[in-house]
Image (spheres, rainbow, N blue to C red):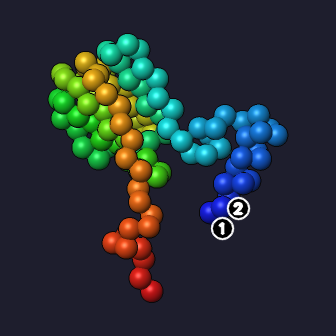
Amino acid sequence: MVKWRQQVSKWMMQKLELPADIVMDLPRITMIGQLHIYIENHRGVKAFSKEELRLNLINGVLIVKGNDFVIKTILPEEILLEGKIDGVYYEELNNKDPAQKKTK
C-alpha cells in the first residue's frame, strides 16, 4: 500500500507539476545565512533548548544545532528560529526496527 501511494505521489508531482514538499508531505526549510531558519510542514516540537531544536516529521526528526536559539514564530506546522545555526540534520525513522513494529 505504501509503495502504491509513493507511485501515485510521484505521478502527481510529474504530471500535475505539484511541488514535492506538498505531494510527499516533506518539510520545506528556508535558511538565511546562519541567522534564521524557517521550517514548514513539521509535526510538532519534540525538544527545544538554546543549543538545539528537534522537530517531529512524518518519517523522522529534524535536528537544528547551534547557539543562542530563540523561537520567533511558532504555528501548528511552521516555525521560525533565530540564533547562530551550526548544522541541520535529519534522523529517519527505522520502520524495520522490531521495537517499532505493531503486534497483533
- Count of marks placed on residues: 2
The residue tagged 2 is 4
Q: Eyeballing the image, is 59 above or below 16?
A: below
Element on which disc 2 rests: helix
Q: Eyeballing the image, is 103 above or below 64?
A: below
Amino acid type assigned to the residue bearing label 1 in the image: Met
Could you say which quadrant of the image residue 20 lies in?
Answer: top right
Which numbered disc covers residue 47? none
Could you say which quadrant of the image residue 71 lies in?
Answer: top left
The answer to which of 73 and 46 lies nearer the viewer is: 46
Identify the residue at image location x=59%, y=38%: 21
Tell me where residue 30 appears, x and y as whole percent.
Answer: 46, 23
Tell me where residue 49 appears, x and y as whole percent.
Answer: 18, 35
Identify the residue at image location x=41%, y=82%: 103
Q: Residue furthest bottom?
A: 104
Question: Do labels 1 and 2 touch, CB within 8 Å?
Answer: yes
Which numbered disc covers residue 1? 1
Tell me if 57 is positioned left or right of 34 in this view.
Answer: right
Amino acid type assigned to the residue bearing label 2 in the image: Trp
Q: CA distance from mark 1 to mark 2?
A: 5 Å
Identify the residue at image location x=24%, y=43%: 47
Is residue 102 at all visible to an observer of this figure?
A: yes
The answer to which of 4 and 38 lies nearer the viewer is: 4
Element on which disc 1 rests: loop
Could you say which quadrant of the image residue 44 lies in?
Answer: top left
Tell me where residue 85 appears, x and y as whole percent.
Answer: 29, 22
Q: Quadrant of the C terminus?
A: bottom left
Tell me if 17 is positioned left or right of 20 in this view.
Answer: right
Identify the residue at image location x=23%, y=34%: 52
Tell me where residue 7 appears, x and y as whole percent.
Answer: 72, 54
